[in-house]
Image (tube, rainbow, N blue to C red):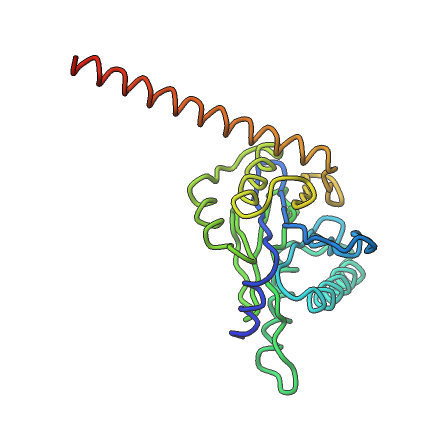
Amino acid sequence: VEYALAAVRKGTLAVAGRGTDAVVVGAEKKMVAKLQDPRTMRKIQMIDDHVAVAFAGLTADARVLINRARVEAQSHRLTLEDSASVEHMARYIGGVQQKYTQSGGVRPFGLSTLICGFSPEGNAELWHTDPSGTYTAWKANAIGRSSKPVREWLEKNYEEKSGDECVELCVKALLEVCEPGSKHVEIAVVRKGLDGADTLDETVVDAVIKKIEDEKAAAEEAKKRRAQAAEEAARAAQG
């Protein structure tokens, strides 16, 4: 399990946050080779129409685990004639991960997941699972490389807001570690009452990043002005 956790810590960063009417998932994009199809390297995937998952760690392990979760979601729908809840999928994925920590001849899955969607009552849900099989509910969380400082940043800045404001929060969290630009950041939004995750277009992501950088520049400028005014006031008092 220690080696599996080390694989997660080396994985690309993923961030998720709950809003009032949406759950936003963001992931750091790895640079793909010039001739490679970027669609084959998605870090955010759908388990069912209403459940999205982002992962950090070994991509091959994630593919196997996500496929098993998809089969479980379809089996649940077929057996009970109802879609599986987000908590059910988190419990199932955690159970599979835990089983692989104690069975002979197998190794633990080298990935952590962030599972998000809406409950049948319409409440936003976000669950985290790790290689040991532990699953827990969160308001916002980060996994992968440099997740600790990003999680600390989220603790200071998280407030449950609407979908668009939640998108800004997740982008800001990713920019704590990632280079600015849609080439480095991928964002998906699961909205209340709608099936599927809305993956934001690169132009939309770039517009959000530009807005954040402009706000940051304006705040720094205001800080400089305040410092200058305080300096001048101090000089005047001495004079």
Position in image of residue 47 (x %, y %)? 73, 56
Position in image of residue 220 (x %, y %)? 44, 27
Position in image of residue 37 (x %, y %)? 82, 53
In depth, the one of 164 and 57 nearer the eye is 57
Q: Residue at horizontal 76%, vertical 61%? A: 70
Quarter of the image for the C terminus: give it. Answer: top left
Position in image of residue 24 (x %, y %)? 62, 43
Q: How many marks?
A: 0
Quarter of the image for the N terminus: give it. Answer: bottom right
In depth, the one of 163 and 229 nearer the eye is 229
Q: Classify 14 as above or below 234.
A: below
Name the quadrant containing residue 179: top right
Q: Is residue 213 left or right of residue 191?
A: left
In depth, the one of 170 and 52 nearer the eye is 170
In the displayed image of the protein, which residue is found farthest to the bottom? 104
Name the quadrant containing residue 156: top left
In the displayed image of the protein, which residue is found farthest to the front? 239
Name the quadrant containing residue 73: bottom right
In depth, the one of 174 and 225 nearer the eye is 225
Q: Residue at horizontal 57%, vertical 55%? A: 127
Q: Classify 212 as above or below 108.
A: above
Q: Is residue 233 left or right of residue 217?
A: left
Q: Residue at horizontal 73%, vertical 33%? A: 203
Q: Residue at horizontal 73%, vertical 68%? A: 64
